[in-house]
Amino acid sequence: MRKSYADYGITEKRAKFLLKECREGKYYAQVRAAAYQADPLVAEYIISSIMQERAYDLLEFDGRLGRIPVGRSNFYGLRRYTIAMLNNMLSRKDAA
């Protein structure tokens, strides 16, 4: 799960733009769908990280969610994958 954004065909600039948009409250439903597709076990942690700009260190022992069940590298890999899927969802929506 150590793929980069480039491995998914998304630029760092586009990823940062999407993260900014998410933190402004956009695309919540799409982020949820993408996160659950990426990994249902870690989805709520990914959603929190993307929507609220919470780092792995803050999520590792989350009071509400409990201890995160994956390591840092896998978490950030799943997070990048989620952003790539979000990008694909939005691209398909724009093309329709």
Image (cartoon, rainbow, N blue to C red):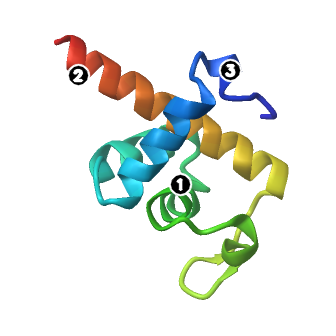
Mark 2 / mark 1, whichever is N-terminal: 1
Residue shown at the point (16%, 12%) measured from the top left: 96
Q: Residue 81 sits in which quadrant?
A: top right
Mark 3 / mark 2, whichever is N-terminal: 3
Residue 85 bears which disc, if any? Answer: none
Which of the two discs, 1 and 3, sits closer to the camera? 3
Could you tell me which quadrant the N terminus lies in? top right
Q: Position of residue 2 (x, y in %)?
A: 81, 34
Q: Secondary structure at mark 2?
A: helix
Return the residue at label 3: 6
The Cα–Cα distance between marks 3 and 2, rounded to whole angstroms, is 21 Å
Return the residue at label 2: 93
Residue shown at the point (57%, 22%) measured from the top left: 10
Q: Position of residue 59 (x, y in %)?
A: 66, 73
Return the residue at label 1: 43
Mark 1 / mark 3, whichever is N-terminal: 3
Residue 96 against residue 71 in the figure, above or below? above
Q: Are marks 3 and 2 in contact (CB under 8 Å)?
A: no
In the rendered structure, the answer to whether residue 34 lies left or right of residue 60 reads left
Q: Amino acid at mark 3?
A: Ala
Residue shown at the point (72%, 65%) measured from the top left: 56
Q: Amino acid at mark 2?
A: Lys
Residue shown at the point (51%, 62%) measured from the top left: 44
Q: Residue 92 sits in which quadrant?
A: top left
Q: Position of residue 28 (x, y in %)?
A: 31, 53
Which of the two discs, 2 and 1, sits closer to the camera? 2
